Image: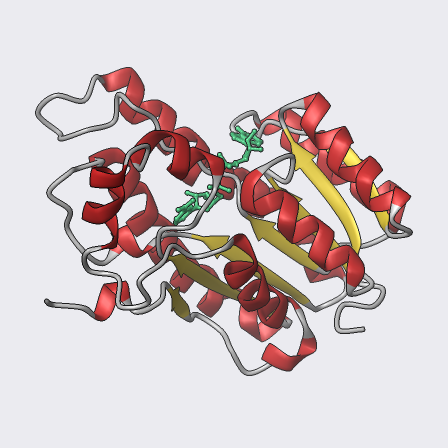
C-alpha cells in the first residue's frame, strides 16, 4: 500500500474532496486525522473509514482559530505519535465574493481567513512536528483560478489561491533541507456539491463553465486525490515547490 503507516492530516475532510481524500488515503494504509470544523460531518467521515476497516480519528478543528489548530495538532501527535502528511484542503468560496468593486470587506476577510490564514496556522503547528523526524509532505490545495482571469469574478477567492501558491514556494525552499517537501495542487472545476448546486445549477451555466474545458467534463474528486496521493507518498521524493495543474487542460486553453 502506497501510504502504509503514514499519519496524514486532511483539513476540511467532513465533505467534498476532503472526504473522498480521507477515504482513499485510508484504503492505501494511511492513518487519517480528520480535521473539520463541522462535528457531525467530521465524525461521520472517521466513522465510515473505521467501519470499512481503516484507521481514522476525528479532531474538531476550525483552521481559522489558532488555539483550535494547536489543540487538534497536539491531539493528533498524542494519538498517532507523529505527522507525515499535512493536506491543506479546507477552503471556501462564498456568494458575496465577486469583483473588488462590490465585494464587502467581511466577505473578503472571511475567504482570506479560511483559504490563507488557515494554511498559515496549520503549517505553524505541524512543521515543528515534521522537523522532529526530518521528513514530511505538505500539500496545499490552490485552484486553476490562480493562473487565469475570469469574467465572472471571485476576486477574494482568486487572490487567496494565488497566495497559497506563493506560500507553497516559500515553504518548499525553507524546509526541504530538513526533509520537508511542499507542493500545491491547482484543480480545475470539480464536480462537488458546492459547484454543482450553486455555480452550475442549470444547463446554460454548465455550458459556460465547460466551454474552455478540452476534456468536455468536470473533474471528479478522485482526479485530485490521485495527485495528492502521489505527493503524499515517497514516490514524490524529488518533487518540491511544484504547482501542479490537475485541471483537464482548461488552464492551457486559449480558445
Ligand atoms: N470544487 C471545485 O471545483 C474546486 C476547484 C478548485 C479548487 N478547489 C478547492 O478544493 C478544496 C476543497 O473544495 P470542495 O469543493 O471539496 O469544498 P467543500 O465545500 O465541498 O468542502 C470543504 C470542507 O471544508 C470544511 N471547512 C470549511 N471551512 C473550514 C474551517 N474554517 N475549518 C475546518 N474545516 C473547514 C467544510 O466544512 C467542508 O467539509 C478547497 O480548498 C477549494 O477551494 C475546489
- Tell me which residue sits at (71%, 31%) in the image: 42
The x and y percentages for residue 222 are: 57, 59
Image quadrant for the C terminus? bottom left
The x and y percentages for residue 254 are: 11, 68
The x and y percentages for residue 149 are: 14, 50
- Tell me which residue sits at (23%, 18%) in the image: 105
Choose between 197 and 178: the one closer to the eye.
197
- Is 103 on the left-hand or right-hand side of 200? left
Picture quadrant of residue 232: bottom right
The x and y percentages for residue 168 are: 43, 59
How many numbered callouts? 0
- Is 151 on the left-hand or right-hand side of 166? left
Give the colour scheme shown: secondary structure
- Tell me which residue sits at (88%, 44%) in the image: 50
Give above or below for 97 relative to 74. above
- Is 90 on the left-hand or right-hand side of 10? left
Choose between 171 and 154: the one closer to the eye.
154
- Tell me which residue sits at (58%, 66%) in the image: 226
Image quadrant for the N terminus? bottom right
Give above or below for 141 relative to 152. below
Give above or below for 207 relative to 225. above
Picture quadrant of residue 210: bottom left
Give above or below for 52 relative to 233. above
Looking at this view, name the residue that lies furthest to the front.
203
Choose between 158 and 125: the one closer to the eye.
158
Amino acid at each position: 500500500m502506497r501510504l502504509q503507516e503514514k499519519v496524514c492530516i486532511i483539513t476540511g475532510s467532513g465533505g467534498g474532496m476532503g472526504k473522498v481524500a480521507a477515504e482513499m488515503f485510508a484504503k492505501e494504509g494511511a492513518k487519517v486525522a480528520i480535521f473539520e470544523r463541522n462535528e457531525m460531518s467530521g465524525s461521520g467521515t472517521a466513522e465510515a473509514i473505521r467501519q470499512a476497516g481503516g484507521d481514522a480519528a476525528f479532531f474538531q478543528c476550525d483552521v481559522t482559530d489558532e488555539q483550535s489548530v494547536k489543540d487538534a495538532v497536539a491531539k493528533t501527535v498524542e494519538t498517532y505519535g507523529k505527522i507525515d502528511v499535512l493536506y491543506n484542503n479546507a477552503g471556501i468560496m462564498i456568494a458575496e465574493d465577486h469583483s473588488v468593486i462590490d465585494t464587502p470587506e467581511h466577505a473578503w476577510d472571511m475567504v482570506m481567513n479560511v483559504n490563507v490564514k488557515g494554511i498559515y496556522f496549520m503549517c505553524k503547528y505541524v512543521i515543528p512536528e515534521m522537523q522532529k523526524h526530518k521528513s514530511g509532505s505538505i500539500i496545499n490545495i490552490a485552484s486553476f483560478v490562480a493562473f487565469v482571469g475570469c469574467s465572472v469574478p471571485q476576486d477574494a477567492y482568486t487572490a487567496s489561491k494565488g497566495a497559497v501558491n506563493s506560500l507553497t514556494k516559500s515553504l518548499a525552499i525553507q524546509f526541504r533541507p530538513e526533509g520537508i517537501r511542499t507542493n500545491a495542487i491547482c484543480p480545475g472545476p470539480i464536480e462537488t456539491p458546492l459547484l454543482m448546486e450553486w455555480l452550475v445549477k442549470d444547463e446554460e451555466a454548465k455550458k459556460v463553465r465547460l466551454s474552455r474545458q478540452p476534456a468536455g467534463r468536470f473533474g471528479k474528486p478522485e482526479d485530485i486525490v490521485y495527485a495528492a496521493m502521489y505527493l503524499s507518498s515517497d514516490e514524490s521524493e524529488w518533487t518540491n515547490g511544484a504547482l501542479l495543474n490537475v485541471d483537464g487542460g482548461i488552464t492551457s486553453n486559449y480558445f
